[in-house]
Structure formats: C-alpha cells, structure tokens
C-alpha cells in the first residue's frame, strides 16, 4: 500500500534543499527507514520538532521509488530536551543512535527498537550514570546483532570459567591455553560489571567503583569498534565524568 505508519525513534537528520530534511529512523516494525520530511525547516512546520534526534513518534509515510515521504508525525515520547540539557547524557545518546544506525537495516528486529527507546528513556530520566547506560546499551545491541560477548566461559572452546584473559577479536574471555601472549587480564570486579551491564543487573552495575567502571568502558568501546568494523565518531566525544545517577532530574511517572 502507498501509505503506511509505524512507531519510530529518530537517529539523525540532514538538510535537503532549502526547507526539507532527510530523516533516518529506526522503526518498530519496518527496520531502518530513510524518508523525506518536506518543509520541516520552515518556522510554520507542524511537525519539525517531532522529527529531531532522540524523539519517538508515530509517523505516517507515503511510499516512494527511492525515499518515502513523511506525511504526518505525532509525538509518543519527547526525550530530546532532557537529554540535550545534560552534556554527558547527550554524548551518550549520540553514540547510541550512531550505533543503531550502523547496526540496523530494513530487516532490523523489534528488539533493537525497544532496546534503543528504553536506553534513551533511562538517559532522559537520569536513572543510572550515563556512561553505564551507554555501555549496557552497546553490549546488548551487539548481542542482538549476533555478537554476544562471553564474560565467563571461554568464547572459543566453551570451557567453563571464570577466565581472566579477554580477547576482543575472539569474542570475550578465553582460557589460558588459548590466550595469545600479552593478552590483557581483567579482574573479577570488572568482569562482574560487564556481565551485569549485559544482563541488565543494575543493582550490581550501580554499585561498581570508578576504577572498575573505567576499565569496563574501555573494554566495551574496544569490543564495539571491532565488531562494527568502522569507528564510531561520537564515541570519542562521550563524557565519562557523569558516572553516577543524576539526582537533579525529575523522574516522570511511567
């Protein structure tokens, strides 16, 4: 059918002509969508603000030969303002949407959409440190894409852990017999935090110390960059100083 609608989260936008934008979105049902939003850069636009990065909207599309056209947009959740008001949250969210853009295509699963929306919601509410939220999102998004890391059993042989040698290229921790010379070793606290971030165990994650969080972040960044095969430009700008919950933000009712 020429018309269809879907729930989307906006990943990025760029200008087209004098008044239009091309909007890249991750949708609930139709994977990643690139569509033209006509006239949204004009001050009289009815839905320009609803199609900014980090926004979640119910959007109607008209199918086109190369790009679809956005004909209607209704806000579902407005996370952009709260995220942009905090630099650490903004840089974390920017890395999230760039990752989602590179990980997903037209056949992206609904789980990727729900994961990203949940992570942006958590950032906007300041539920956890922004760095922790980002690292958890990256690990879980990569897992959904088929690159789940192992933080306990050997990623190559399956030999039960615990193991301390971590090899990004091999998919996680490996046994001593398979660890290449010079392989970095992770202590049990760091491995525990990484496992908690992957599983969504926020009690354990929030209790981790600064040293452990810093080491875990380095591992997550290296693992993400390796498997995406292309560097994340936004990752190098992430502000890791906000590692605790932002108690100044008001948490809205669910």
Image (cartoon, rainbow, N blue to C red):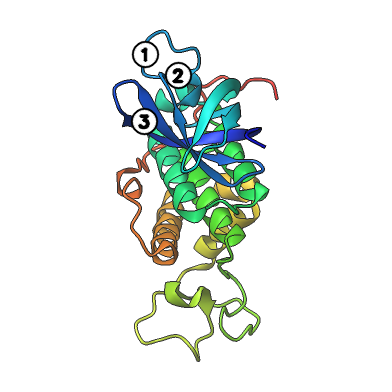
- In the rendered image, the residue lying farthest to the right is 254
Would you say residue 72 is visible in this rendering? yes
The residue tagged 3 is 87
Question: Which quadrant of the rendered structure holds the N terminus?
Answer: top right
The residue tagged 1 is 42
> In the depicted view, which residue is nearer to us: 182 or 89?
89
Q: Mark 3 and mark 1: span between their CA atoms?
A: 27 Å
Q: Quadrant of residue 155?
A: bottom right
Question: Label 1 crowding class (10 Å Cα cut-off): few <14, some 14-19, many 20+?
Answer: few
Q: Position of residue 48 (x, y in %)?
A: 45, 19
Asked which secondary structure carries label 2, the reply is helix
Examine the rendered structure and indicate whether residue 72 appears above or below residue 107.
above
Q: Position of residue 21 (x, y in %)?
A: 38, 28
Question: Which quadrant of the rendered structure holds the C terminus?
Answer: top right
Would you say residue 244 is visible in this rendering? no
Q: Position of residue 214 (x, y in %)?
A: 40, 53
Q: Mark 2 and mark 3: span between their CA atoms?
A: 23 Å
Q: Earlier in the sequence, mark 3 or mark 1?
A: 1
Residue at 36%, 18% (x, y): give it: 41
Q: Earlier in the sequence, mark 1 or mark 2?
A: 1
Which label was assigned to residue 229?
none
Asked which secondary structure carries label 1, the reply is loop
Residue at 36%, 87% (x, y): give it: 181
Q: Is residue 86 left or right of residue 17?
A: right
> In the depicted view, which residue is nearer to us: 189 or 32?
32
Examine the rendered structure and indicate whether residue 55 appears above or below residue 152.
above
- In the rendered image, the residue lying farthest to the bottom is 177
Q: Earlier in the sequence, mark 2 or mark 3?
A: 2
Which label was assigned to residue 48?
2
Between circles 2 and 3, the one closer to the viewer is: 2
Q: Mark 1 and mark 2: span between their CA atoms?
A: 8 Å
Question: Label 3 crowding class (10 Å Cα cut-off): few <14, some 14-19, many 20+?
Answer: some
């Amino acid at each position: 059918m020429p018309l269809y609608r879907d729930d989307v989260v906006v990943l990025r936008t760029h200008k087209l002509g004098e008044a239009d934008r091309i909007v890249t979105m991750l949708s609930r049902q139709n994977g990643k969508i690139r569509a033209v939003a006509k006239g949204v850069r004009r001050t009289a636009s009815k839905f320009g603000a609803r199609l900014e990065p980090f926004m979640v909207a119910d959007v109607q599309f008209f199918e086109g030969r190369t790009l679809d056209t956005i004909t209607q947009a209704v806000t579902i959740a407005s996370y952009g303002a709260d995220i942009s008001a905090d630099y650490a949250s903004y840089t974390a969210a920017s890395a999230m949407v760039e990752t989602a853009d590179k990980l997903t295509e037209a056949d992206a699963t609904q789980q990727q959409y729900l994961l990203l929306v949940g992570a942006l919601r958590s950032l906007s509410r300041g539920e956890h440190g922004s760095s922790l939220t980002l690292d958890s999102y990256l690990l879980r998004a990569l897992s959904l894409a088929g690159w789940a890391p192992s933080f306990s059993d050997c990623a190559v042989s399956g030999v039960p852990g615990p193991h301390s040698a971590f090899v990004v290229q091999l998919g996680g921790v490996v046994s001593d017999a398979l660890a290449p010379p010079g392989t970095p070793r992770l202590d049990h606290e760091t491995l525990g935090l990484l496992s908690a971030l992957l599983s969504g165990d926020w009690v354990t994650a929030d209790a981790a110390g600064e040293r452990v969080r810093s080491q875990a972040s380095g591992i997550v960044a290296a693992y993400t960059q390796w498997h995406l095969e292309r560097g994340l430009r936004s990752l190098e700008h992430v502000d890791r100083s906000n590692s605790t919950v932002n108690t100044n933000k008001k948490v809205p009712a669910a």
